[in-house]
Image (cartoon, coloured by chain):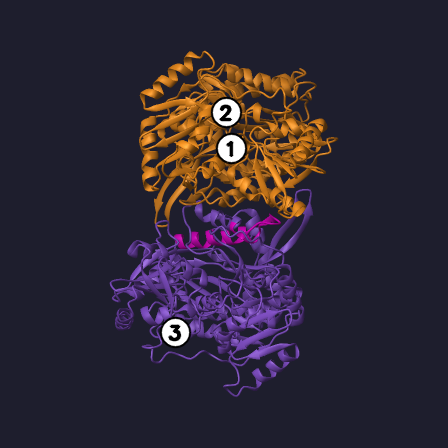
Chain colours: A orange, B purple
Amino acid sequence: MAERIDMLRALMRAKGWDAVVVTGSDPHGSEYPAERWKQVEWLSGFTGEAGDLVVTLDHAGLWTDTRYFIQAERQLAGTGIVLHKTRVPEQVLIPEWLERQFGGEALIAVDGLCVGADFAQSLPGTVISVPDLLSPFWTDRPAIPQTPVFTVNPGERRREKLDWLRAFLRERECDGILLTALDEIAWLLNVRASDIEYNPLVISYLLVTQTDVCWYVLKGEVEDPESGATFSILEADGVRILPYADIDYLPSEASGRLFVDASTLNYQLYSSLTAAGVPLEEGTSPVGLRKAVKNMTEIGGMRDAHLQDGLAMERFLYWLELSVEGGREITEWDAAVKLGQLRADLPQYRGDSFETISAWGPGAALPHYVTPHAYAPVIREGGLYLCDSGGQYDFGTTDITRTVPLGRISALEREDYTLVLKGHIDLAMAIFPEGTPGCRLDALAREPLWRSKRNFGHGTGHGIGWFLGVHEGPQDIRQNLNPVPLQPGMIVSDEPGIYREGRHGVRHENLLLCIDAGQNEFGRWLAFEPLTLCHFETEALDLSLLDRSEIEWLNAYHERVYRTLSPQLPREIADWLREKTLAIQV
Amino acid sequence: MAERIDMLRALMRAKGWDAVVVTGSDPHGSEYPAERWKQVEWLSGFTGEAGDLVVTLDHAGLWTDTRYFIQAERQLAGTGIVLHKTRVPEQVLIPEWLERQFGGEALIAVDGLCVGADFAQSLPGTVISVPDLLSPFWTDRPAIPQTPVFTVNPGERRREKLDWLRAFLRERECDGILLTALDEIAWLLNVRASDIEYNPLVISYLLVTQTDVCWYVLKGEVEDPESGATFSILEADGVRILPYADIDYLPSEASGRLFVDASTLNYQLYSSLTAAGVPLEEGTSPVGLRKAVKNMTEIGGMRDAHLQDGLAMERFLYWLELSVEGGREITEWDAAVKLGQLRADLPQYRGDSFETISAWGPGAALPHYVTPHAYAPVIREGGLYLCDSGGQYDFGTTDITRTVPLGRISALEREDYTLVLKGHIDLAMAIFPEGTPGCRLDALAREPLWRSKRNFGHGTGHGIGWFLGVHEGPQDIRQNLNPVPLQPGMIVSDEPGIYREGRHGVRHENLLLCIDAGQNEFGRWLAFEPLTLCHFETEALDLSLLDRSEIEWLNAYHERVYRTLSPQLPREIADWLREKTLAIQV
């Protein structure tokens, strides 16, 4: 890695740049970029999902949050790159750090394609945009991916969605909207592909005006009948298919007022539009919120996906328990492969929704552990095994975490297992007034941990797409004071945890559907319904830590899991699941 | 009231104003203004603590929040003034309402002294500032109050506070700071008076520079030896005593950069400063946060104040119970008077900290009920009596609510009583990480109510001053996403409630001191310690709704109440309190 930083510094000296800022995103503000845009990883070796790099002539630093501190310290060891911690009280974020170094006088280079307009404008100094900045010395840099494009049926036609978006434009008195976020484009056009690992997205830009729909997308360079058929369908709906690179002509061709979302618009495109004098209306794209509220078809699909996924999970947990009890030497990697195979056997499975975290003992103490392929640790009796995984299906997306006790577990493991489940249940049981944002519910999942001074450094819940990204906004359940209210039809994860470095980790995660719970003299009420179907391990519980209502919730959930899944499981697994889901006496 | 609005409209026609906006504040942004500045009440008859009035030639509207809907509907009946509801999802706030009426073209008059600069600038149209706008036809308008000024000893000298403030000015590169909030001035100078009912404040402005302290204050017009002595003490500390009206000269005399807090600076003064070209640095005054974190002397004083106050409360509750059981006809007003007398008997009592709410049965369903002097309802057996009150003492300020069952209560009253106490206890028991703002804890007090779809329309907690205002910021525990973290030394109220119009109301309120609860591998922890000392009514509880930890908290609190108060109570009241505070078996 050090040579790559050296090559970058040679370029910096030649160009007279004081600093280069490299972020972990792509030209579309994606959370998970394709290989071509994993620039932070290529330069630093850090593989966490969130990290930004700043290189000056005498310093190289990686900024990442609490979730990745342990991983970053390991991966950066020996590189000379310094870890800068974020989401801690003493954090100094990149703009402030640069301000302290250069007092606002720096010449800062960024790959404008891969830096958001919002972020670039927050940097103190003169910011110059250099598209594909690393390409001159990243000689084997991967190309932009191009996979077959296909259509999906989420219960709402693209013409209806376009009509809705055009009404929004009229209301905002704009002539057009430029969509840059890949999940928003896929949602609006009812299309999917596999351009980004785990994310069924098509790398593209989309311009919608009252009369035109222009889709800038890679096409035609590879023989691909599926994409061809898809493009024909879209053209019949009035969508013009244009080459991806033609987005460069947009600034000079655009006429009228253009709505853009600066949180996903890249700085290069933003600068070109501004330089060309295109009047921009900046705001939050309305697609995000509309996409987050699932319609009845999508909700039905999500239920089907979770039934399928639950079958794979129960088969997996049965296999794991018997294998470990039977003394077979199973590694974390073997387990992840087995789970992937069980999901792959399901009809309409389209791949995993993220890289499976399969972690035993100390590995599980890293909330975003990456299971090593070679020399993976063996899963042994006497400890906790944690598995966080999810699938993509034609009709939905799943995300589930279960922690499994293997053999005898310690008193502390039992306490942690129970308190995290208590927090999980307390959030799942919540009833709350209409208009409540998720951040106001976050403490419900944490309070059972806080009481004995335990906590976790990640969010409690994130939104999830319908056969789309496993993380989506705008709602969430976190410590950040995100004001977006939860609404019926939104889906969030519920995933508290406890992580003890060098010892063990516990996390329990279901997806919850937000539902209407009726109205009374105090107003309208909302509640949650679990979508995920898979048992928890009652034998790992310290029942003295749970109250009656929590045990009743668990019993009712377990009965639903058993009744829903058992008819489609082989007899021996159904019998095993019956034992696992027997009601706890209260 | 209608004639007053008519007189205002005649003035509007003469001047060509499209709208007059009248707010419920004074020239210092006070929550509780002196009589002179109760303009909304004088014009509309509405006596709630929060309300703004807009008068146009064909509409008069009062904007107020959920707390005052019932009261406003009663008080506005027949006036022709329309209630505009705020803090509801469909709210249309004043700027937006004016925008819809006049499309940004209106000529809007305000009494610039009594409107904040922030608010005036948010109004759409041409805003003109007319000081004392109502005075031409408010012929018996009260004068600016002027009561004796005295000094207090909160454990930190005014010279130390001035040094700290001057260091802040150097850091912000300002030459001076203009303090306009009365509680900030009183805190900084260690002075008090009684200019505003219930609030021991001195109506004044304060300018602090590196070399000067100029206090613009009413003085010398009335013979007042106490104020004279106080002014001498302050002059010895370098404070120049100037006439209140001389603030008008500040804009022409100010030199250098001036720090102002636009949330309490009035629009008249703001406009004058801007017109005179004084460079303003706008921000949040640092005094508010510093004042909110109590020092050891202040905390000790608050403990003493709560011991005194608890003695008065227990004497009061004993008297009430015996009186009602004995068949004496006690009105809500009689009860309020009795409590006031019991507090007045205490040493160093300085008056009430707000107007006592003494409400039986349906009256208690109004969270901010005002007990009528004449024809007050009689407190009868068979229902709940609610009393929210507080005292000012030389060494602290108190604020307590107790709800008392009289005779038999209904099952719903019992449930409401218990669930509100459950919410109160859950918040009081909370342990939470350093850096947590109060809004993230609000759900802990509400969740026990939410579970059975009950709620309340006011905040859960507010800050409180040390022998200052009963409400102070910047911290609170509310639904609003206020990001200010709680800190050790801050004090907040914990006052959930349930209100059922026409039936009953329940509220339980203690003040909680935020304390350090130690550090472990998960970080630093904070917790609360109740300051208020007064029993709750265990015979009103439905014990099946409380869990073991809640009952244990209540038992421990009750034991502390008994042990602390009983040595200073007469034998018969101490014995009665022993019965009231006996531990509930778990």
- Same chain? Circles 2 and 1: yes
Q: Quadrant of residue A445?
A: top right
Chain ID at mark 1: A
- Same chain? Circles 3 and 1: no
Q: Is residue A261 above or below residue A327?
A: below
Name the dominant secondary structure of the magenta segment. helix
Chain ID at mark 3: B
Where is residue B60 shown, x and y percent of the image? 29, 63
What residue is disc 2 on? A199
- Same chain? Circles 2 and 3: no
**CA separation in Å, label 3 and label 1:** 54 Å
Identify which amino acid the numbered label 1 is placed on.
Answer: Gly
Q: Nearer the viewer, mark 2 or mark 3?
A: 3
- Quarter placement of the N terminus of chain B: bottom left
Q: Is residue A322 above or below residue B176?
A: above
Where is residue B570 shown, x and y percent of the image? 57, 73
| Res B467 seen here | no
Q: Assess whether residue B430 is covered by the magenta stretch.
A: yes
Identify which amino acid the numbered label 2 is placed on.
Answer: Asn
